[in-house]
Amino acid sequence: MEPLLLTPGPLTTEPRVRAAMQVDLGSRDPAFLAVTARIQAGLLALLPEPEAFVAIPVQGSGTFAVEAMLGSLVPRDAGVLVLVNGVYGARAAEILTRIGRRVLPLVTPEEQAPDLDLLERRLRADPGISHVVAIHCETTTGQLEPIAEIARITAACGRRLLVDAMSSFGALSLEGVVADAFAASSNKCLEGVPGLGFVLVRRDCLQAGLCHSVALDLHAQWSRLAKDGQFRFTPPTHVMLALDEAIRLHAEEGGVEGRGGRYRENLRILVDGLTAMGFVPLLPADRQAPIIVTFHSPSDPVWDFPTFYEALRSRGFAIYPGSLTQTPTFRVGCIGQVFPADMHRFVEVVREVVAELGLKKLSPELS
Ligand SMILES: *Cc1c(COP(=O)(O)O)cnc(C)c1O
């Protein structure tokens, strides 16, 4: 039996999504061009102002889309402030450094919210900063970043915002989030299979010849798609057939609101259940996104993540290790084809495993 994936992606997908891949379509076949166009329209429809944006698919995992966004939209002489409180903010800064942009990371500890007063002071003090890069949900911890506030401050200071919306797109509203671009991928809250990233870019922001990379050049990718509906290089046809079906399912579930609603219910059952047992979440409820939850590792001397993982795995659930540098943690995802009934079952299984392993002290040592 395959376990249910309580991870940040790849996720458990709907059988209809996997079944959609059982077709070999030529990349120039009119049926495939229609799939591409439908996906583009479907992605745009999830934005508050769809007509102002274009949807540009990029082959690869989510990071390829982030790298395409940064390389294609940040001018060579730009200064970029990157909000960093986790792995993905740090990765955006690393990409920008690698491609030779002037990067100004604004680093806050992983379990803390970004310092918005400091953001504003930095922007006002340094006119050389033209862009801000922010993560919507920092998947490292599951933190919901104050993206609307970040957007408001960035716009008030006359700067441009680029958003990594990878783990939130399709489940969390972007209402009021004014930005030049949003990057996301097929295999997170849209519940497709991995293999396609995409960037939704404000129409007037695309500029020819800016990107350092041929394969990741969003302007070139967009020009070709606008010309004849085709990719420049081999598209992941099966992945896109699956995404086309996944977007249909997303609409059937009630769009961003419906999907986000189910994830919020999953979150509530998970956090209530594990907290009642004595586990302690890393983040306060008001900064917890309904995507993935970080729990402190229990301080009980018998605690061993691989043993805990295996015991849950053998009962049908795959969880995720933590990735915090300072604090020992583990993570449990709320996204994918996972429903409240599954979450209730998961909580019961955790209770069984805790008893079986003889775990008594589930809270962390608070020093
Ligand atoms: C998953 C994720 C990415 C992309 O990761 P890949 O492993 O390249 O798909 C980027 N940013 C965030 C916030 C993510 O959650």
Image (cartoon, grey):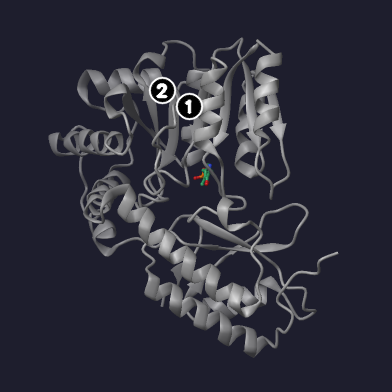
Q: Quadrant of residue 130?
A: top right
The kind of secondary structure element at disc 2 is helix
Position of residue 26 measured from the top left corner of the image (x, y, whole percent): 21, 39
Residue position for label 1:
69
> Is residue 177 in view?
yes
Image marks 2 and 1: residues in contact by CB distance under 8 Å: yes
Report how far apart the C-alphas of labels 2 and 1 lie in the structure: 7 Å
Identified at 39% across, 63% down, the residue is: 12
Q: Nearer the viewer, residue 304 or 351?
A: 351
Is 177 left, or right, of 229 in this rendering? right
Would the CB of label 2 be found within 8 Å of ligand 1?
no
Q: Nearer the viewer, residue 4 or 180?
A: 180
Position of residue 275 measured from the top left corner of the image (x, y, whole percent): 60, 73
Residue position for label 2:
218
> Is residue 103 in view?
no
Would the CB of label 1 be found within 8 Å of ligand 1?
no
* Residue found at the very far left of the displayed protein: 30
Position of residue 111 measured from the top left corner of the image (x, y, whole percent): 69, 50
- The amino acid type of the residue labelled 1 equals Met
Is 72 left, or right, of 307 in this rendering? left
Is 44 left, or right, of 349 in this rendering? left
* Mark 2 or 1, nearer chain start: 1
Q: Is 126 placed above or below 234 here?
A: above
Q: Quadrant of residue 150?
A: top right
The kind of secondary structure element at disc 1 is helix
Identified at 41% across, 78% down, the residue is: 1
Position of residue 320 measured from the top left corner of the image (x, y, whole percent): 58, 63
- The amino acid type of the residue labelled 2 equals Leu
